Image (spheres, rainbow, N blue to C red):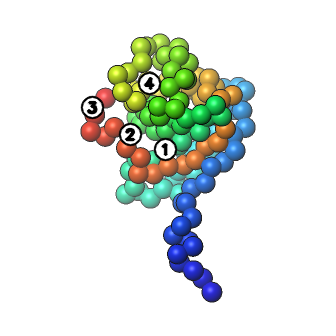
Amino acid sequence: MFNHDDEAAKPRFRPVPWTALETPQDVELWIAEHDLALKEHVAKQETGYGVCFSLAEGGDIYMQTTEGAVILDVTPEADWVEPLLCAIAACEPPKGRLWTLPDDKLVQLILGLSVLIATTTLVVGHDFGRRHSY
């Protein structure tokens, strides 16, 4: 017998163990696979979709790519990674949790974070600062 309550209790997306990426080509392949997963599992009407990088030393970074930008939502527990993000973005940290990087920094960002990531999880419905202008 099928129990709908059990199905409702299961999370839609589950964490996937991360394997460190070592080259820009590895990152490009991961990006292509991630884009394919989003197309397969996220409905067109859904918003706030992206990926959550859970860091081995604590905290999460939610990432969404848009045309021309990479949006990062860094949880307070992940503030320790701020110097790396500043180096990649060549900028000062933002006043809040949301970072906006040019899209040409995506490969460098993922390479820089790669050894720090424990798991990744697809996300939908995350507030990537829609009410803010970028």
Q: Nearer the viewer, residue 95 or 23?
A: 95
Residue at the spot 31% in from the left edge and 40% down from the top edge: 130
Cα–Cα span, label 1 and label 4: 15 Å
Which of pointers 2 and 4 lies earlier in the amino acid sequence?
4
Residue tagged by mark 3?
A: 133
The disc labelled 1 sits on which kind of residue? Answer: Gly
Residue tagged by mark 4?
A: 101
Residue tagged by mark 1?
A: 50
Cα–Cα span, label 3 and label 1: 19 Å
33 in relation to 13, above or below: above
Which of pointers 3 and 2 lies earlier in the amino acid sequence?
2
Which of pointers 3 and 1 lies earlier in the amino acid sequence?
1
Residue at the spot 73% in from the left edge and 37% down from the top edge: 19
Disc number lying in front (1 or 2) = 2
Quadrant position of residue 6 = bottom right
Point out residue 62 in the picture as x, y percentages from the top left corner. 49, 38
Q: Do the residues bearing badges 1 and 2 touch, measured as CB atoms within 8 Å?
A: yes
Which of pointers 1 and 4 lies earlier in the amino acid sequence?
1
Point out residue 88 in the picture as x, y percentages from the top left corner. 53, 17
Cα–Cα span, label 3 and label 2: 11 Å
Q: Considering the numbered disc 1 on the image, is that residue within a helix, a strand or a loop?
A: strand
Q: How many marks?
A: 4
Q: Do the residues bearing badges 3 and 1 touch, measured as CB atoms within 8 Å?
A: no
Point out residue 57 in the picture as x, y percentages from the top left corner. 64, 31
Disc number for residue 128: 2
Q: Considering the numbered disc 2 on the image, is that residue within a helix, a strand or a loop?
A: loop
